[in-house]
Image: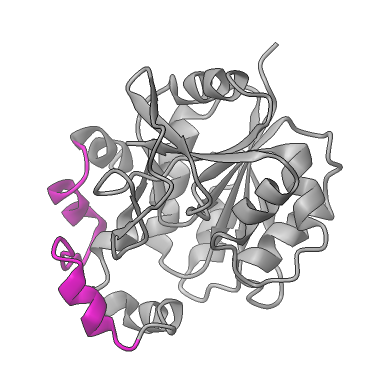
Amino acid sequence: MEKKLLIYIVSYERMNYTIGTIKSIFSVAPSNSQIIVCDNGSTDGTREWLEENQEKYNLGLLFPEENLRVGGAWTLLTKYFKEDDFDFILLLDNDCWIKPDKEWFKICMEIFDKDPNRCSLGLLKEQIAGTFSIKTLPDPNYKNVQKYKGQEYFDTVFYAAARLDKFNIWHQTMVNWPHKYIGDKIGRHYNSLGYKATKLHPGYIFDISKYDVANPKYQEYNEWFFKKEKTLETLRIKEEKAKRMTNINDIKEIFPTEIYKLLNN
């Protein structure tokens, strides 16, 4: 019997990113899955677009009155479901576009089956294997790497969103989550309970905002998101591949042709 999957997208502004995220995951979502979007108070037309396209993409919608950040949005979801309502949850930011590979969920299930203590898979494609974050920091856990059907995988805590978690363990963790942000905290918590968090490379999820930090359209958002950094300029220098993108069509310069075609359907 196919596992029940909940796909949960947290959005804030950047409507074209959100549209791309929904279109990409909708095209490869398993049949036994549900998509829910939590919009954290967007004012750029995102909420209106979601309502207009709710039936087309079979979306569940949550519209909190304030920006709960990712941690708060994840905790909010636990109020609507019991821990045994789903088998797995795919957690996405609104800049996470999935590779057009209908086998992704099946392969992930097979990797889970290799170790009953594995409760999470990080699916984000990093530019360099064994690194994390926009600054390609080296992951000290990149060792004892195993391979399966085109994917490397290794145990690490260094990933946040773009993750596939066992729903019951995630639910138990997030019911009383005290933080606004996720970072590596959730992976460390899983480890403390005796579970393994594992990361794939190349994975299945593209983080398109990595290439868009210089886009003036999202200047205000990026300044908020990277407020712990001294300046956006530092990020631009370190991220040599960052490109100025003014509309969704420019994505074809970076991302696979299949994704670009998908977004124009």
Q: Quadrant of the N terminus?
A: top right
- Position of 51 compared to 200: left or right? right
* x and y percentages locating residue 62 in the rendered image: 69, 59
* x and y percentages locating residue 248 in the rendered image: 26, 56
Relative to 182, residue 192 above or below: above
Q: Quadrant of the C terminus?
A: top left
Q: Among all residues in the image, which is located at the extreme top? A: 1
Q: Nearer the viewer, residue 52 or 15?
A: 15
- Position of 50 compared to 229: left or right? right
Q: Is residue 40 magenta?
A: no
Task: Describe the colour scheme in one phrase.
Answer: one colour
Q: Nearer the viewer, residue 114 or 54?
A: 114
Q: For residue 247, what is the image quadrant?
A: bottom left
- Position of 265 compared to 240: left or right? right
Residue at left offset 46%, top offset 28%: 28
Q: For residue 166, what is the image quadrant?
A: top right
Q: How many marks?
A: 0
Residue at left offset 62%, top offset 61%: 185
* x and y percentages locating residue 195 in the rendered image: 68, 39
Q: Which residues are magenta?
A: 230-256
Relative to 79, residue 23 above or below: above
- Position of 228 compared to 59: left or right? left
Q: Is residue 214 visible?
A: no
Q: Nearer the viewer, residue 246 or 176?
A: 176
Residue at left offset 59%, top offset 63%: 182
* x and y percentages locating residue 240 in the rendered image: 13, 65
Residue at left offset 21%, top offset 83%: 233
Q: Is residue 84 visible?
A: yes
Q: Is residue 246 magenta?
A: yes
